[in-house]
Image: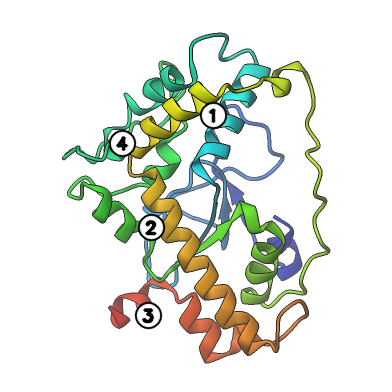
Amino acid sequence: MSAATALGVPLQAAYEAGARTGLPRFDAARPATFVVGHHVDFGTLRGARVRYATMVRNPHAWLYSLRLDLAAGGHWTGGTWTAFLEAQLAVCPALDRGAADARCDAPNATNANMVYAWAAGLPAAAAGCGALVDWWTRPSRLLLVTERFGASLWLLATLLGLAPPAAPPRENARGGAAYETRVTLGSERALADALADTCVPDVYVAARRRFEDAGQRARAYCGGGGGPCDLAFSAVGRDIWPPEAAAAARS
């Protein structure tokens, strides 16, 4: 949001119905220059100039955070960690390692599916982990990493031609009893096995690799990184994060 403000361009928000963001709602017929929100995937916008940016997180940490957040809001009150994951995956067969079905239902009144974000709008004609990784790693997607949050913010800002933001705080600002939930070693092992049967780890590994490569190239161009440079207006910057038309011509 701050990037759109700094660039002086219009912004729209694509969140679930009823979400109060204070921002204009996403209009598919007349999309703004910047569109943000949980309900944006790689198929939301089409066009020669479209570019996407998203941030991935270690799948274990992401799942723990999701369940604890739902529990804190009273949306999840019991069951094991693996049962929670299985309930999420039941409406998103696209993430099943052995599935031939690219379907992934968005959250609605009858399900609390949040793993749909990992399916990222995969076309119905595609299925399997290889197809999903290919969908995620198209050149027009800028893939950032939560575990490298500061470096991710620097890369995004620099590729947009903005001054790098201040270093983010390192502490977790959230609190409450739900966030003190402990996970047993047995639960962790079961969850690791359950996640291994999905395509989510494949996506994370590929995204992390893409991020490290983009960051290395950007820092090399900018003389080590950390400060402002003209990466956004250079051939290197356009190659790191091209719009869809340029990406299609390159493939």
Q: Do the residues labelled 3 and 2 touch (CB within 8 Å)?
A: no
Q: Which of 228 and 215 is in front in this view?
A: 215
Give the x, y percent position of residue 118: 42, 44
User: Closer to us: mark 2 or mark 4?
Assistant: 4
**For the residue labelled by badge 1, is the local secondary structure a helix, a strand or a loop?**
loop
Q: Quadrant where the C terminus lies?
A: bottom left
Quadrant containing the N terminus is bottom right
Q: Name the residue under label 2.
A: 136
Answer with the quarter of the image where residue 5 lies: bottom right
Q: Amino acid under label 1? A: Ala
Mark 1: give few (<14), some (14-19) or many (20+) Cα within 10 Å. Answer: few
- Residue 246: give its label: 3
Front of the two marks 4 and 3: 4
In the rendering, at what x and y percent does residue 40 appear?
Answer: 48, 47
The three-letter amino acid code for the residue at tag 2 is Trp
User: Does the CB distance between marks 1 and 4 fall below 8 Å?
Assistant: no
Q: Which amino acid does label 4 sit on?
A: Asp
**Residue 176 versus residue 246 in the image, above or below:** above
Determine the secondary structure under disc 3.
helix
Q: Residue 249 carries which label?
A: none
SS under mark 2: helix
In front: mark 1 or mark 3? 3
